[in-house]
Amino acid sequence: MEMSGGIQASLAGRYATALFALARDARTIDKVESSLAAISAALAESPDFKALTTSPLVSRADAGKAVAAAAKAMKLDGTTANFLGVLAANRRLAQLPAIIRAFRTLAAHHRGETTAEVASAHPLSAAQVDALKAALRQRLGRDVAVDLSVDPALLGGLKVRIGSQMIDSSIRTRLNSLAYAMKG
């Protein structure tokens, strides 16, 4: 499977591609994507879960037991739960955020969608996400999946990356541009 942007080139990309192939063959892409969204939320909201995935002090066996328990508690699909076990056994849990991003890109491409990476200063509401998707759909002429992240350093506004195209309406960039213009 050849993807734009060289997704397969990175370690996370190889793991994401393998997970995607399993999900595609089992016809569970949507379930896996939903499970990965739950994992992404857990990484953002739970310092303990994030520490479990990033700490080199957690043994492979303990990490495996912990992710199995977390997968059960989060009601993750079987494919994703098994995948977490493989990541724990291979000491690759720290790669989860990159794997999730790569999987989303693969799934969106599979559906004929374009993926936009969107950074905002504050979490976006569901209505704001819907409005953003509609604006991007109108601009690009096709459906757009959004990969959201929060970067408080932006102060306000958005940074949107679609492939190699960047739309930067962040307040930080505007202030930097104003400061540069005033130096004249």
Image: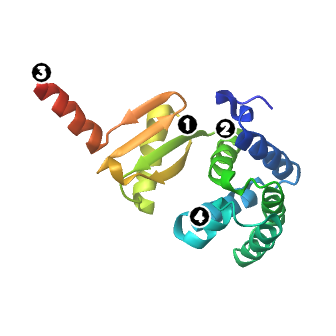
Q: Are marks 4 and 1 in contact (CB under 8 Å)?
A: no
Residue lying farthest to the top in this orientation:
184
Residue 115, given in percent of the width and then of the height, sits at 57, 41
User: Three-letter amino acid code at disc 1?
Assistant: Arg
Q: Marks 4 and 3, how far apart in space?
A: 44 Å
The residue tagged 4 is: 43
User: Three-letter amino acid code at disc 3?
Assistant: Gly
Q: Where 33 sits versus 74, above or below?
A: above
* SS state under label 1: loop
The residue tagged 1 is: 142
* SS state under label 2: loop
Q: Which disc, if any, is residue 184?
A: 3
Q: Are marks 3 and 2 in contact (CB under 8 Å)?
A: no
The residue tagged 2 is: 112
Q: Are marks 4 and 3 in contact (CB under 8 Å)?
A: no
Q: Earlier in the sequence, mark 4 or mark 3?
A: 4
Q: Earlier in the sequence, mark 1 or mark 3?
A: 1
Mark 1 neighbour density, 10 Å: few (under 14) some (14–19) many (20 or more): some
Q: Earlier in the sequence, mark 4 or mark 2?
A: 4
Look at discs 4 and 1 and give the one toward the viewer. Answer: 4
Q: Answer with the quarter of the image where residue 50 lies.
A: bottom right
Q: Earlier in the sequence, mark 4 or mark 1?
A: 4
* SS state under label 4: helix
Residue at coordinates 76% horizontally, 53% vertically from top-left?
A: 29
Q: Earlier in the sequence, mark 1 or mark 2?
A: 2
